[in-house]
């Protein structure tokens, strides 16, 4: 029976592995993953139950220099997520250099006084001597409560990390039901899985100028889900690229997304996709809010 909860934020630079770690902790895919930066746009709270403790893991967007109103929103989400939690995980790569983004996050951690765990990800890519150098460098920059080397990709260090996080759990009621693994609505996760495939299949700036909206989500009597999705892009030329020659690119995106959505929903999904142009939507506060990026 759950008698303790721990609210934990994961923060770090773009593309450091925050969403991969979130998925590894939960054991299911709830946060989208891409090798392109700025993949996560919103806070995703993952729920992990272990023994008598419920962990609520807040996966934040990568900390970067904003260039649009949406970018401003994403950076504010990171700053707010570091406050009012039981502990923060600063996720870094095993590189013996502290970049400007890490320096800003460490400064924010010092400012709030929140307990902080340094999580060094991707340790499967370096030698042990290099790892010791990274640990020494960050230890000199801040007095971290713990340092956990791990590989989110292959699961190495997950148990050690959860054991460390358990130290910050507070006595209190269960926040989420046993069968709930994420506080995002199913519609939102389906939209994010489509956006992940846009990031996977499209080049350069195009996928960052896209937004995905689920316009219909209905379940038939036989359990099949009908899903209508609109992909917004910023230019007519981008629309042509997303659709592709004779619709080939949009078909590929749809097929890849449907496979992941069916795995997540546990049922067959009938997915239909449309592409619409919405110029400069990333600088349109009303449209940003309509897509669920609220600043409260």
Image (cartoon, rainbow, N blue to C red):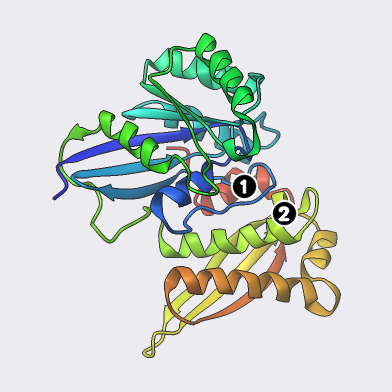
> In terms of depth relative to the viewer, which is nearer, 102 or 217?
102
> In terms of depth relative to the viewer, which is nearer, 181 or 245?
181
Residue 122 in view in this figure: no
Residue 57, x across and y down, in percent: 38, 42
Q: Residues within 10 Å of mark 2 (few under 14, many from 20)?
A: many
Q: Residue at x 79, y 76 (%)?
A: 248
Classify mark 1: helix, strand or loop.
loop
Q: Relative to 286, is 250 above or below?
A: below
* Residue at the extreme top of the image, as rendered: 140
Q: Residue at x 51, y 18 (%)?
A: 106
Q: Residue at x 60, y 37 (%)?
A: 16
Count of numbered labels shown in the rendering: 2
Tell me: 175 left or right of 192: left
**Dots 2 and 1: beta carbons under 8 Å?**
no
Tell me: 162 left or right of 261: left
Residue 119, x across and y down, in percent: 49, 30
Residue 110 in view in this figure: yes
Residue 285 falls in image quadrant: top right
Query: How many angstroms separate mark 2 from mark 1 (CA)?
Result: 9 Å
**Viewer-side label of 2, 1:** 1
Residue corresponding to mark 2: 207
Q: Which mark is residue 194?
A: none
Disc 2 or 1, which lies upstream in sequence? 1
Q: Residue at x 59, y 25 (%)?
A: 131
Q: Relative to 288, is 241 above or below?
A: below
Residue corresponding to mark 1: 39
């Amino acid at each position: 029976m759950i008698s303790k909860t721990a609210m934990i934020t994961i923060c770090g630079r773009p593309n450091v592995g925050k969403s991969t770690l979130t998925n590894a902790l939960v054991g299911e895919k709830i946060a989208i993953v891409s090798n392109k930066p700025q993949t996560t746009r919103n806070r995703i709270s993952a729920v992990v139950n272990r023994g008598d403790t419920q962990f609520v893991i807040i996966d934040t967007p990568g900390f970067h220099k904003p260039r649009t109103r949406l970018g401003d929103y994403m950076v504010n989400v990171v700053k707010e997520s570091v406050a009012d939690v039981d502990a923060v995980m600063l996720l870094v790569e095993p590189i013996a250099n502290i970049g400007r983004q890490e320096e800003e996050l460490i400064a924010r951690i010092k400012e709030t006084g929140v307990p902080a765990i340094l999580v060094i990800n991707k340790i499967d890519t370096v030698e042990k001597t290099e790892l010791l150098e990274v640990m020494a460098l960050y230890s000199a920059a801040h007095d971290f409560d713990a340092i956990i080397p791990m590989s989110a990709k292959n699961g190495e260090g997950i148990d050690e990390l959860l054991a460390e996080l358990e130290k910050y759990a507070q006595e209190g009621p269960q926040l989420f039901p046993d069968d709930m693994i994420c506080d995002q609505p199913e519609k939102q996760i389906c939209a994010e899985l489509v956006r992940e495939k846009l990031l996977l299949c499209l080049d350069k700036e195009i996928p960052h100028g896209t937004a995905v909206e689920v316009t219909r989500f209905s379940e038939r009597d036989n359990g099949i889900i009908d899903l209508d999705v609109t992909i917004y892009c910023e230019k007519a030329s981008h629309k042509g690229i997303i659709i592709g020659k004779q619709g080939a690119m949009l078909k590929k995106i749809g097929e890849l997304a449907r496979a992941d959505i069916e795995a997540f929903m546990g049922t067959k999904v009938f997915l239909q996709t449309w592409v619409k142009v919405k110029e400069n939507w990333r600088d349109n506060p009303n449209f940003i809010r309509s897509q669920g990026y609220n600043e409260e």
